[in-house]
Amino acid sequence: SGVNEPILYVNGVRRVLPDGLAHFTLLEYLRDIGLTGTKLGCGEGGCGACTVMISYFDQNSKKCVHLAINACLAPLYSVEGMHVITVEGVGNRRYGLHPIQESLAHSHGSQCGFCTPGFIMSMYALLRSSVKPPSKEDIEENLAGNLCRCTGYRPIVDAFRVFARTNDALYTNESSGLLSREFVCPSTGKPCSCGLNIKDDKETAKRSICRGDILKPISYSDTEGATYTDKELIFPPELLLR
Ligand code: FES
Ligand code: FES
């Protein structure tokens, strides 16, 4: 495998980009390789059913950038050298749902389900790209590109609101003794990193969103060889060098 061959990573798995697919969108490619969780709705950037997250290393800021994009609009070759995460890479029923997925399911935010992967990916990208938990307003704005014909949005907004920061003072008031990046868990009201290393207790067990330690690392067939931290797919180290 040459250093300069065109590659991308999908859900943590390295893939060589074949020649001759210049006419392919990222969405067509993903569905072609069996990742059919990402849906084709409008095909023109209007509905968000095809939302995936792309990550790349920005050489200027020396940081990983995570973005939600419409896979129906992205030419396949435009994501060369990037990491693409689809809903399959976030979680599933067999190996553990991500707290975002659990919360949406429990709030009845998924009816026909067609829009669901897109909503999950928009929310996932927001959380992964936020240094501190987003505000409720951030969350609602972030969903502006995702359409749902079934739910009337309220259950979806409610499901995701639990990821919003609950106390702005904790982020701005250094004298509180809390680091500005500390996250106040919506379940416990205490600083924690929900879904990463919180200890389970009665209070969190009642709520579905704050049980990171029951989410096992995902390793199903099409992500074989992928590297996970606790449960999030990491940025592939190979892509730092490109
Ligand atoms: Fe509607 Fe991509 S399929 S935005
Ligand atoms: Fe049917 Fe959203 S649940 S389109």
Image (cartoon, rainbow, N blue to C red):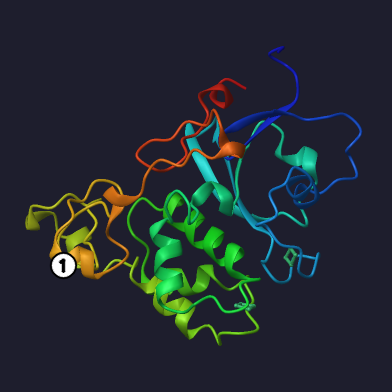
**137 sits to left or right of 12:** left
Instruction: Name the residue rendered at 78%, 30% in the picture.
Output: 17
Q: Locate residue 65, reporting x and y percent.
A: 52, 42
Q: Locate residue 191, reporting x and y percent.
A: 17, 57
Q: Quadrant of the C terminus?
A: top right
**159 sits to left or right of 4:** left
Q: Amino acid at mark 1?
A: Glu
Instruction: Name the residue rendered at 80%, 65% in the picture.
Output: 44
**144 sits to left or right of 1:** left
Dot 1: within a 10 Å radius of its alpha carbon, few (fewer than 14), some, or many (20 or more) residues?
A: few
The residue identified by callout 1 is 203
Instruction: Name the residue rendered at 53%, 29% in the picture.
Output: 236
Is there any visible trace of residue 114 in the rendered image?
A: yes
Which quarter of the rendered image does ligand 2 occupy? bottom right
Q: Locate residue 229, reporting x and y percent.
A: 38, 36
Q: Locate residue 2, reporting x and y percent.
A: 72, 12
Q: Nearer the viewer, residue 158 or 90?
A: 90
Q: Is residue 144 above or below residue 224?
A: below
Q: Quadrant of residue 76?
A: top right
Q: Nearer the viewer, residue 118 or 169?
A: 118
**227 sits to left or right of 80:** left
